[in-house]
Amino acid sequence: MLDQVTINLHSSIAIHNVKALYFDPFRIEEKTSDADIVFVTHDHYDHFSPDDIAKVLKADTFFVAPASTAALIRKTFGIADERIVTVAPGDKTEVLGIPVEVVASYNPGKPFHPKANGWVGYVVTVDGLRYYICGDMDITEEGKAVKCDVLLVPCGGTYTMDPKEAAEFTGLLKPQYVIPTHYGDPVGDKSCGAAFAAEVKKTSPDTEVVFKL
């Protein structure tokens, strides 16, 4: 199920279809040099990892990132401005033919991901499916407004939603499929995925939980 989606670890997500899309590459073992677009949600080391981005980078890779991360990308890789799409919450754009919507990603009641930082999640449409890659967040008004077919939601707790909160969020969005992320390593117990799936049966019984971790 959803064979086009892989998770290397944590929130290091890839969607391979007509284009190769990478989100927050992290702990990539083998150099692939195949990324058409690299999306970065925010600046933390487990989401913006230059060494891992370098392993998927090719000569014409495009980047999509919030302003603070876009500046780091320019400094680190020397990428030409025309290949860096700087985004902010609420933006809608198209990159290499892929529709992209940008959603605020933050913790309303925690200090780890302040709303003022302008960090983001992404909704990308690939082969007719709308994928919502949340980034690091808790339940937010902006997130609740998203319409998606596939939800990739953090459930490891501490810095993001825990399993129960992530299941509550899933119940609000009611996607066709949900993929739990951001647990096991380096943050969140390995049991979070199963706990999340059990809660989704209560909050959104028609949503299919698909495990990629």
Image (cartoon, rainbow, N blue to C red):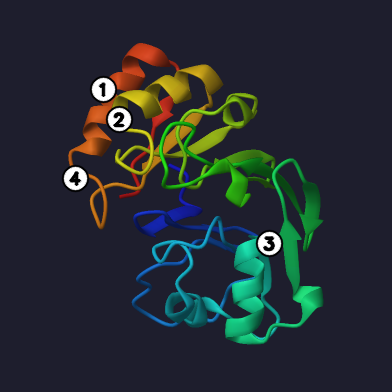
Chain-order first, disc 1 or disc 3: 3
Which of labels 2 and 1 is toward the front? 2
CA–CA distance in space, label 4 to label 1:
14 Å
The amino acid at mark 4 is Lys
Chain-order first, disc 2 or disc 3: 3
CA–CA distance in space, label 2 to label 1:
9 Å
- Quick one: SS at disc 4? loop
Disc on res. 190: 4
Disc on res. 72: none
Q: Residue at x 61, y 45 (%)?
A: 116
The amino acid at mark 2 is Pro
- Quick one: SS at disc 1? helix
The amino acid at mark 3 is Ala
Which of labels 3 and 4 is toward the front? 3
Task: Determine whether label 4 and label 2 are within 8 Å by CB.
Answer: no
Disc on res. 198: 1
Q: Which residue is mark 3?
A: 67
Q: Residue at x 37, y 25 (%)?
A: 165
The amino acid at mark 1 is Ala
Using the rendered image of the protein, determine whether residue 120 is visible from the camera's viewpoint: no
